[in-house]
Amino acid sequence: MTAVFASLGVYMVPDFKVTPWEVTGDIDYDVLVERFGTTRIDDALLDRLSSYGDVHPLLKRGIFYSHRDFNLILDAFEKGEGFVLYTGRGPSGDTHLGHLLPWLFTKWLQDVFDVELYFQLTDDEKFLFKQDLSLNDTRRMAYENALDMAAVGFDRDKTKIILDTANIQQLYPLALKVSKKVTFSTARAVFGFDNSNNIGSIFYTAIQAAPCFLASEEKGRNVACLIPCGIDQDPHFRVTRDVAPGLGYLKPAMLHNKMFPSLNGADKMSSSDPDSTVFTTDSKKTVKSKIGKAFTGGCVSAEEQRGKGGNPEVCAIFKYQFYLFEEDDRKLDDLVSRCRSGDILCGECKKHLTEKVNLFLEQHQKRREEARAYIGDMTYCGFEW
Amino acid sequence: MTAVFASLGVYMVPDFKVTPWEVTGDIDYDVLVERFGTTRIDDALLDRLSSYGDVHPLLKRGIFYSHRDFNLILDAFEKGEGFVLYTGRGPSGDTHLGHLLPWLFTKWLQDVFDVELYFQLTDDEKFLFKQDLSLNDTRRMAYENALDMAAVGFDRDKTKIILDTANIQQLYPLALKVSKKVTFSTARAVFGFDNSNNIGSIFYTAIQAAPCFLASEEKGRNVACLIPCGIDQDPHFRVTRDVAPGLGYLKPAMLHNKMFPSLNGADKMSSSDPDSTVFTTDSKKTVKSKIGKAFTGGCVSAEEQRGKGGNPEVCAIFKYQFYLFEEDDRKLDDLVSRCRSGDILCGECKKHLTEKVNLFLEQHQKRREEARAYIGDMTYCGFEW
């Protein structure tokens, strides 16, 4: 079992790229830890976390696998100083399961620690980085994404939705302070910018940095901030961490997750390949169709697979179970055994996953619709949608 | 007389630099017109303008000497489409006479055409470009500068003060749209940025562009915008003009003034050399002392000057009269003659100028204090100081 877990997402091919705006190739998450200079979540940290109750499967399975200063967050909590959570979404289209993953985990953190959450919708970012999107487009998408975020079930009284263009009054002074300490040289090195990047995109990281310090500004004292997010977002907060002490703030801490896999076998879901991506608003029929076409670790014929067995390590269906849809380790172990022995074939696996995903989405979509009634109450500083 | 006017500020030394953040060396204003690609204000344009009444001395004397599309502004006005004025100030310190010059001219434009004015105070800019200034500093300075602006006597009902950090909610969407169309390559070429510039400063020009389009946004139709300002600000609006059509807006038009000369004989007043700069809050005694030390075109001894005469072309005292303090051409001509013939010596000239400047400042300072009572009513979208 451990071997399967450990090997998932670890392919020793150096040809991959991970930036906040581009994730391509087979990602080597071990190399990323070294390249970004983050810290692996180790057993000692998981042990410490277990004192708060059951450790979340995403941590146990190494999907949230890397961090920056999470131990300092626990220190702050244990000293009674508290902390806030901060995560978000770049609204460039519909929400898919890959977006939900860190939010589900963030909800768990909010439940365990009973803390406030800032959820940032970066409509400005997506406008600046996507040639074809208007600000109206990204704002509309932000609202749709917010419904998904609310459907995850965050504590409504402790969760504030930031929409960049609506909350710029609050964000701008902080962004200015950050931006004054970041040279183009740094931005170029961290994000891979060149002369063709627009000047808005170059400034943007300062806007994403700002919410890290909102709680400190509001409370008039330094409040620690923990950011659960995809490892692809680390470059932003690496820059933020570098400038924070010079501004008199604590460095934001991070918990990094691996990318949610694609149904086509690739390392990351992509909205640009809808067939490989399950959106939160997909119908049951669509989900069935997408999962039906998914890449698996099966053989060419049923007969061959019954003899040789399948390979769960490369199977998108198995990865879905592993990432989100089977929290019970024993059931997952059993699935691996049955696949390898040829006891269960791909069709059956796909059917089981389809049922689980559709059940999940049915409940999610219901909560998503209910959220329309109260989402306006969750906006930061009461902006109007 | 004409020869003296024409030669003022025209020194054929190529070693000068004019950017929005740095003006050094002896400025060749003819070269600037070519370098920036602006259009000289010619007799035909002055003739056209004379149909609206007396042409302002700053135009007749070639201090407002260059423009972009001013003829289109007159077209729009004559067709009844109207236009708005836009100028401003980067609040990095006290207001001096050099700052007042374009404002006095802008008030004249407002009086002649009875149009609205947006006055932008760029507290964000000065924070980003001045290492030692905090946002609190630049905001405080913005208020002080606004008092000077109000003291000029703009139509209070038709003049709105924009403070960038206070009005960012209105400016940001427009700035985003501009910034998406400006590459780092362009910003580097226009402003001379390099890798060491901070990312806020690189983005900033988009914030200065935004007010050009506020009237169009407010009125829901294209409204022409005329910007009277120092030629050093042209690079910003050259960029703005390039992107305006792609955003569906009219290109902003401009009227450019030469820099107000320094008392030490240099081409531009500088706050960093207070002795060479008359601030609006200077006391009578201070003004007397500064003018007393000013660089003149006089000789070493009174006796020599009575024989050889003085040289008004290089004289700071004469330039002050020429720029702001003697609107009567005949009196100015007379002054030139008397100086050249040795009939009037520097001491007498300094005494006359001191009296004029102190009378001007006495009235200005009175109106400046009165402005405290109503300046809050002039803020754009009613922001609180």
Image (tube, coloured by chain):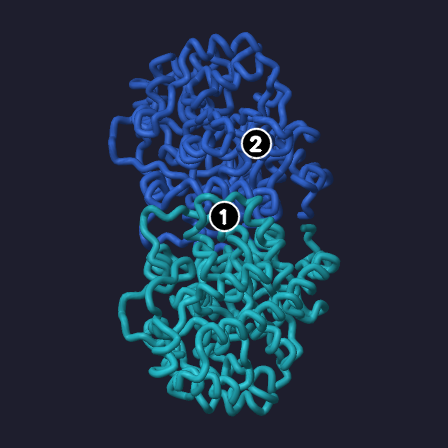
Chain colours: A cyan, B blue
Task: Name the foreground residue: A128 vs B86.
Answer: A128
Residue B242 pos. (x, y %): 41, 32
Q: Do labels 1 and 2 share a chain?
A: no
State the SS at label 1. helix
Q: Which residue is drawn at 68% across and 37% down?
A: B378
Q: Single out the residue that lies furthest toward the front.
A: A303
Task: Name the foreground residue: A356 vs B70.
Answer: A356
Which residue corresponds to mark 1?
Answer: A127
Q: In this view, does A299 lie above or below B226?
A: below
Residue B187 pos. (x, y %): 37, 42
Residue B209 pos. (x, y %): 49, 37
Q: In which quarter of the image is residue A305?
A: bottom left
Q: In this view, does B42 lie above or below A306?
A: above
Residue type beneath disc 1? Phe
Task: Name the foreground residue: A222 vs A33.
Answer: A33
State the SS at label 2. helix
Classify 10 Å Cα crowding around label 2: few (below 14), some (14-19), many (20 and above): some
Classify 10 Å Cα crowding around label 1: few (below 14), some (14-19), many (20 and above): many
Left or right: A330, with B167 as reference point: left
Task: Name the foreground residue: A268 vs B342.
Answer: A268
Q: Is residue A10 above or below residue B152?
A: below
Query: Which label belongs to residue B358?
Result: 2
